[in-house]
Amino acid sequence: MPMRGGRLPAGRADEGGVRPYERLLGSRTGRGAAALCAGALPALAFPAPSLSWFAHVALVPWLLLIRSAPTGRRAALDGWLGGTGFMLAVHHWLMPSLHVFIVVLAALLGLLWAPWGLLVDRFLGGSPSARRSVAAVAVVPSGWLMIELVRSWEGLGGPWGLLGASQWDVPLALRTASVGGIWLVGLGVVAVNTAVALLLAVPTGRRAAGACLIAGAVGVGATAVWAPRPQEAGSVRIAVVQPGVVDGPGSVERRFARSEELTRGLAGQDVELVVWGESSVGVDLSRDRERAERIAALSRLVEADVLVNMDARRTDGPGRAGIFKSAVLVGPEGLTGDRYDKMRLVPFGEYVPARALLGWATSVGKAAGEDRMRGSGPVVMNLPDGLRVGPLVCFESAFPDMSRQLTSDGAGLLVAQSSTSTFQHSWAPAQHASLAALRAAETGRPMVHATLTGVSTVYGPRGERVGTPLGTDVSGAAVYDVPLARGTTLYVRLGAWPVYGASAVLAACMGAAGLRSLRRRSSAPDDHACPA
C-alpha cells in the first residue's frame, strides 16, 4: 500500500518489490501493533528506568508512523492506539489492582490522542514547507499539552505520567519548571521530538527544524541565567519515619508500634518536625484519646510536633459521615487543631466514579468498596517556631496547582504523606517520589515526601535532592537538614501560562484553517449565479 507521508527507512525488498517494514505497516494488525508499541516508548523516560534523555526522542517513532498514514482516518487511529499504549505503559503497575479494567480505561483515555493524530498528519504529513515545519514545532506540542490538561482532571485519572515529569532530575528542566511549571517542560520536550522528526524525515523542513532547536536551546539557556532563583532563608531539621511493610493480622497496630519505636530513636536529634506517612494512624484521634496521648508523648520526647495521617471513619457535620484521609498535627499537649482532609481522591482506589455505572469494577479488581470523603479546602499549618507547612496527601502531589496554592497561601515547606505499599515492587514508588522534585522546583519551596514503605525523600527549593532517600527495602527513620527559601517563582506568580499559550496557538491554527476554507469557497464558481 503506498504511503502518503514522507520517506521511510531503507530496507531490502522482497521479490515483489515490497520491503518488510512496508508489509508490516501495510497490514492493519501490524500497523496497530506498531502504534501501540511506539506510544509506549516514552514510559522508559520515567522512573524506574529513568532515561530522562530518552524523552526528547521517544515520540519520534510515533510521529513518523502517524506521518506515514495513508489517510486522515488512519492517522487518527494511530494517534488513538499510540495513546492507549502510552496510558498502559505509564500505568502498568495498576494491573494487579484493576486487572482487565485498566485496558478499558487506557483505551478510553487513548481517544484523547485521536485528534492529535490528525494534527500531526496535517503538519508533518507529505512534504511540509519551511513555514509549515516551524508551525509544526509550535502546534504539535500545543496539541499534546491540551491532552495532558484534559486528562489531568481527577476524574480521568489525574496528572500521572505527564511527559515533563520525566525530567525530574535534569537541572535545566527544573529551572524551566520554576518559570512555567511542568507544563512548560512538557511543551519543550514535545517540541524537541517534533523537530527531530522533521530532521529525520522532511528534507524541506530540516533548516526550519534546526533553527527551532537552536532557538529553544537559547531560550532554555536564558531561563537558566535570568529566571528568579529562590533566596536562601536558613534551614530546618525534619525527620521522616518509614515503618516499612507490615502485613497480616493486626498490621495497623503493629505499624503504629513500629512508628512509635522509630520516633523514640529521634530523641536528642534537635528535629523541628517529625513526619509519618499516609494512613499511619487507623483511628480518629479526636475520639481515641489514648492513641492521641501516645503521639503527644512522642512529641514531648523528641521536642517537636508530629505530623501523622489518619485513615479513619469520622463524622464532620451533617451529611459528612464517612472515611476521611487527614493530615493531623500533634504537639506536646495533644492535637493542635491543625488538620487537613484530602481533597483529591484516587479514582477507583479511593472512590469509584459514577459508581452506579462502574461499580462492577470492584468485582474484577481492588477498587474501593466505599467512597472516601473529600476535604473542603487547602490548609497551611503553623509550627511553634513559625514555619508554615503545606500538607498534601499521596496522589495530590501530582497536581501542580495544589502546591502552588499552598505556596501562595504562605507555606514555607511542602509535605506529602503517601503510601504505595500495594505497588511496592513496581515503578510506582520511584515515580511518585520523583514528583516532589518538580513541585519543589515549581514553587521554590522544599518538599518532604514521606511514605509508609518507601520511597521517602526530600528535595530543596530548587528541586535538588537533600540527603539520602529511604528505599522500599528500608524500615527506619532519617533526619534531613532541609534548606528553606523565600521569594516566589514565576510559576507561582503567573500560574499555568504555557497552557494558555498553547490554547492560543491552537485557536490561531483553527482560525487560519477556517479562513482558508472561507477563501476557497468564495473563490469557487457559483453554479447558481445569474449569467452575465
Image: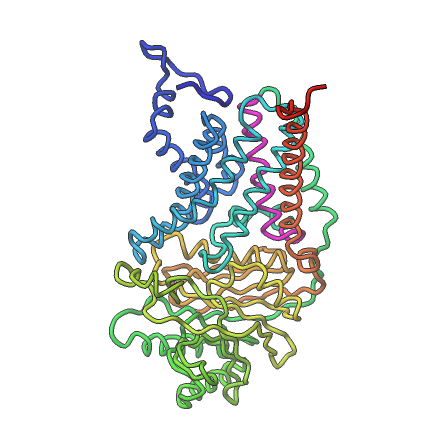
Quadrant of the frame with the C terminus: top right
**In the drawing, does residue 392 fall left or right of residue 80?**
right
- In the rendering, at what x and y percent does residue 71 appear? 46, 27
Q: Is residue 187 magenta?
A: yes
- Say which of 457 and 354 sits in front: 354
Report how many numbered discs are placed on residues in the image: 0
Vertical comparison of 87 with 138: above or below? below
Decide whether the magenta segment is chiefly helix, strand or loop. helix
Segment colored magenta:
177-202
Vertical comparison of 213 with 152: above or below? above
Quadrant of the frame with the N terminus: top left
- Say which of 210 and 348 sits in front: 348
Vertical comparison of 330 with 245: above or below? below
- In the rendering, at what x and y percent does residue 93 appear? 36, 53
**In the drawing, does residue 496 fall left or right of residue 284?**
right
- In the rendering, at what x and y percent does residue 274 appear? 51, 74
- Say which of 239 and 142 sits in front: 142
Q: State the residue at coordinates (45%, 80%).
A: 320
